[in-house]
Image (spheres, grey):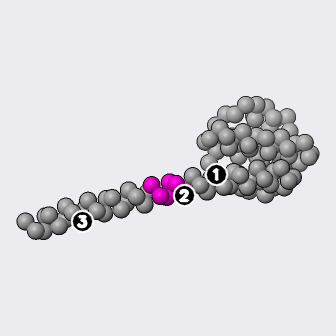
Amino acid sequence: MVYPTFLLIFGYISMGVIKRLIRNKDMMDQETIESNKMLALSFQSQGLLDMAFDKLKRCPVRGNAIREHLYNLALDFERKRMLNKAIVVYEHLLRGGKFKDVKDRIKKLK
């Protein structure tokens, strides 16, 4: 009777600890994504487009906010006549699916 009770209590405690660790990891991932996004925006506003792209590459391309930032970054590369880098950003953007006129812009730049 003692052994099954011990296993039940131990299992309950370990499941609680595991859930808490997973929840904290998700919160840390969210904070990391947000900090990378903010750093990228800061770099982009300073004209450091390569560094901004390095930070945005670390964010998942699923979110519309990230995709919009990537699109604006590619437009900045185009404005600075860095067409190869703009194509790389557009191709990275397409990994998340269709977005605006990205395919047409890639064809035009090539």
Q: Which residue is painted at 64% across and 44% down in the image?
A: 61
Residue 81 position in % (x across, y down): 92, 45
Badge 1 is on which residue?
A: 34
In the rendered structure, does residue 8 fall within the stretch colored magenta? Answer: no
Q: CA distance from mark 2 to mark 1?
A: 10 Å
Q: Residue furthest left?
A: 1
Q: Is residue 74 left or right of residue 27?
A: right
Badge 3 is on which residue?
A: 10
Q: Is residue 25 left or right of residue 48?
A: left
Quarter of the rendering occupied by the C terminus? top right
Q: Residue 67: which quarter of the image? A: top right
Q: Which residue is painted at 73% across and 31% down in the image?
A: 100
Badge 2 is on which residue?
A: 28
Q: CA distance from mark 3 to mark 1?
A: 36 Å
Q: Which residues are magenta?
A: 23-29
Residue 91 position in % (x across, y down): 73, 44
Secondary structure beneath label 3: helix
